[in-house]
Image: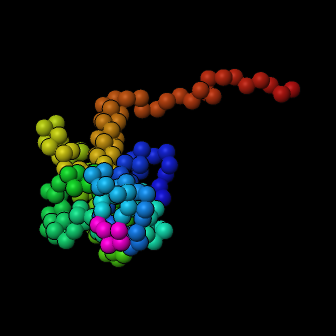
Amino acid sequence: MGNYYDIDDILAEEELVSVVFQKGANGVGIDPSAEAYSVEPGSRVKLPFWLAYELHARQVVTMKLPACFNQQTRLELGADGKAVDLRSRCLYFYEFGCKIAPLVGDRDMGSFLLSAFRNRYQEVLAKAHSAAYTAASKLLTLLTKEEINLYEAAQSSMAAFKKWRMGGPRLQRASVLGRKRKSTD
């Protein structure tokens, strides 16, 4: 699975996934309104990814492709990926896509995620270096967590460059140069 201590990884695995039970399960309370604590084979349920992953590894369930990776999303990202609101579909779009691709058997998911990231990457960096505050706040409502991290890194590097360019210390004297060496005679 993922990194145990990474909060972003934990939150990415909280995304809901539609699963179909292949085997019956007794003693589980998936639906709180149900009277019996059991799940029949063929039942469709939405589970967090971390639980669906474990059940899939035990061959209890099969996963369905989440709605955030459906054909409509792929067409929208192919047409104009810069204007698509991925944040509302899945905050951890790229991370979640990489985790779920091998489990749903989608061979095109990797190339789809790469092309989507490439298309949006240029726009994110261009806006980070040139956008005003009002345009930036609108842009941030469309970005995924990975893209927000990229945007913030680009802005901080641009701020550091401007600070250096405007007269920050050009050369610093090494602390070693100020000390005198003892003679070894």
Q: Position of residue 176 (x, y in %)?
A: 63, 28
Observer-nearest of 177 and 147: 147
Residue 92 seen anywhere in this rendered image of the structure: no
Highlighted magenta segment, given as a residue range: 40-44
Q: Above or below — where is 147 with respect to 132? A: below
Residue visible at 33% across and 46% down? 149
| Residue 101 is covered by the magenta coloring | no
Q: Position of residue 130 (x, y in %)?
A: 19, 44
Residue visible at 21% across and 44% down? 140
Residue 171 seen anywhere in this rendered image of the structure: yes
**Based on the displayed image, in which of its 4 quarters is residue 179 positioned?**
top right
**Tag count in the figure?**
0
Residue visible at 22% across and 56% down? 89
Q: What kind of secondary structure does the magenta stretch mostly adopt?
A: loop
Observer-nearest of 37 and 81: 37
**Based on the displayed image, in which of its 4 quarters is residue 99 positioned?**
bottom left
Quadrant where the C terminus sits is top right
| Residue 41 is covered by the magenta coloring | yes
Observer-nearest of 88 and 121: 88
Residue at the far front in the pictured view? 35
Q: Above or below — where is 65 with respect to 8? A: below
Q: Position of residue 165 (x, y in %)?
A: 32, 35
Q: Position of residue 135 (x, y in %)?
A: 13, 42
Q: Above or below — where is 87 with respect to 172? A: below
Q: How is the image coloured?
A: rainbow
Residue visible at 48% across and 59% down? 1
Observer-nearest of 76 and 162: 76
**Based on the displayed image, in which of its 4 quarters is residue 108 positioned?**
bottom left
Residue at the far right in the pictured view? 185
